[in-house]
Amino acid sequence: MELYEVIGVHLRHALRWWWLFVLFPAVAGISAFVFSMAQAPAYVATANLLVGTSYNTNLTDSLYAGSALAKTFGQLFKTDSAILAQTRLSLSKQFNEGLLRATTATANVAKDGQVLSITAEAPYPAVATAFANAAAASFTKYIAAMAQTRFHDLLQDLDVQLKEARAGVSASRTELAGLQAQKTAMAPEDFAREEARLQGQIATQNDTAVRLQESYTSTRIASTLHQTNLIPLGQAEGAAQVADPAYRNGLFAGVLGLVLAIGAIFLLEFIRDHPVGLYQAAGVLQVEALGTIPHYRDARGRRRKASYETMLEQSEEYYRILRLNLQNYGVSETTRTVLMTSLRAGDGKSISLAGVALASAADGQRVTVIDADLRRPSQHVIFGMENRRGLSCCLADELRDARARKMGDDVPLRLSLPYNDVPRGAGGLRLITAGSSDETNVRVDCPPMKAVLERCGSEADLVLVDGPPLLAAAEALSLAKRVDGVLLLVDPAASAMRDVVRAKRMLDNVGASLLGIVFNKAEAFSMGYYYSYGRDGRDGRYGWDGRERRDRRDGADSK
């Protein structure tokens, strides 16, 4: 199968949930639109600040440093809540507190730019304009304070050390003056030694004071040069109203709803747990995968409803493969009576059983088909036979005969079976129809049914029993334990894996032998290349009766 066909299969599965594709986007979009319309209008105003530096005389380096600082300041404005708190405090006398708390401000910087744009958003234009200007002023003061405090501690320490050095020089000079006043009272040698000591001390202290003064002066100069300049580029004037986001929000919510719908559909399909493939289901049940029968498709490859005759012709090759697999893996000398059942009504078990019966009869086997689905019989319609006397009549007569003679359950079958020869079965196919609907009290789980199966098994190579759905009628389990083997037909698009496992467990509980499973109405991509070969039903050269067929469209030999 081509890729577009595989995609089409998955789309058909998804389109079963089309109402979710409509519901989710509609609810999300309408809700977002209504909510957005209910919101108060917003106004924005912007104040711009030019970020520059004064410590680098190189123009290129200065521009690069200013751009880097602008980005840093933008992040600082967003992270430091003290700036907005100071802004609200400065406007507290003009506007009420609730209005200021509803106002927000952000800082943005253009790529590789030095302009810092502070934008305020408020319910009223006057508030937005005032808040933008106040935020710019507060941020300018904030940066200036940071620049001033950068060298504050160092200058303070240098100032203290410089004062201590000058005080030491003054004290040493005072001591030297006192020494000179006592010169006459001291020995010349002692005076000279003490004078030299004091003069050296004064010289050292003077040098220290000079160095501290130079450090203090250079630090003051550096603090001035390293200041960052925030230059206002005009104040914000007139706030603009923000574009109505209702339609935009509604559209965005609708797209989001569509994505959620797709996710919900995948989740629902996962919860439904469809069997992914024939061999996966067979592996879970530990039984043989006997065959796959595709959807009927017209000449253009489209799925269409068709008559039983058309479906049998189209799927002829698939029924032959199913018959061969059944012969190789299931039916033996001791396995002659086979029940074909499904999980639910409408899975296609009756037409599949008829196809296997025709394929077996065409191979030369003596085949008997028993329509044991008394509630919804269909084998007489498929083969074009009358349904006057059939299985229900035979069972009713035998029950009446048994009651009349007061015999036990193991009653030998005395009445002849109502066989109908099927002309298209090449002489080897016989049919026992369900019979008249007048016998409403007859059930296939009655004791004479065992004798009917034994008689048919002794007179045919293969007995195929069309039973009621396994999960819908209790008679199916009664038939399952009376036949030699059971074929379970599954519609993968309508059956969950848990139901298949449940059916297997029910058959095990009554001691039935499950020969294998068959997939009906399957997609070609899950069947492999070989099964896709001849899916239009015209690859076989010969029909069920052994006569060579002609192409109905142009009369030429089928290829």
Image: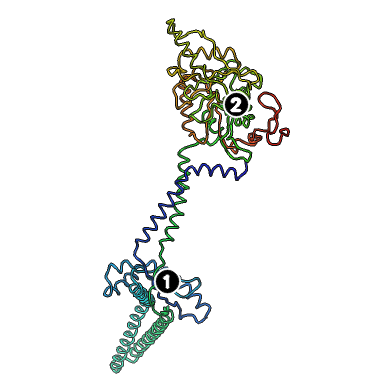
Please determine whether, in this image, residue 125 is positioned above or below residue 362.
Answer: below
What residue is drawn where x is 45% and y is 57%? 252
| Image-quadrant location for residue 291 | top right
Residue for badge 1: 73
Q: Nearer the viewer, residue 180 or 27?
A: 27
Give the amino acid type for the residue marked by disc 2 in the picture: Gly
Tell me if residue 272 can be seen. Answer: yes
Mark 2 secondary-structure assignment: helix
In the picture as drawn, the residue positioned furthest to the top comes out as: 405
Q: Position of residue 200 (x, y in %)?
A: 38, 86
Question: Which tag, 2 or 1, sits closer to the chain's start?
Answer: 1
Residue 297 position within the rendered picture, expressed as x and y whole percent measured from the top left: 60, 37
Q: Which mark is residue 346?
A: none
Amino acid at dot 1: Phe
Colouring method of the image: rainbow
Picture layout, residue 266 above or below residue 384: below
181, above or below 392, in the image:
below
Query: Which residue lies under the disc numbered 2?
Result: 355
Circle 1 — which element? helix
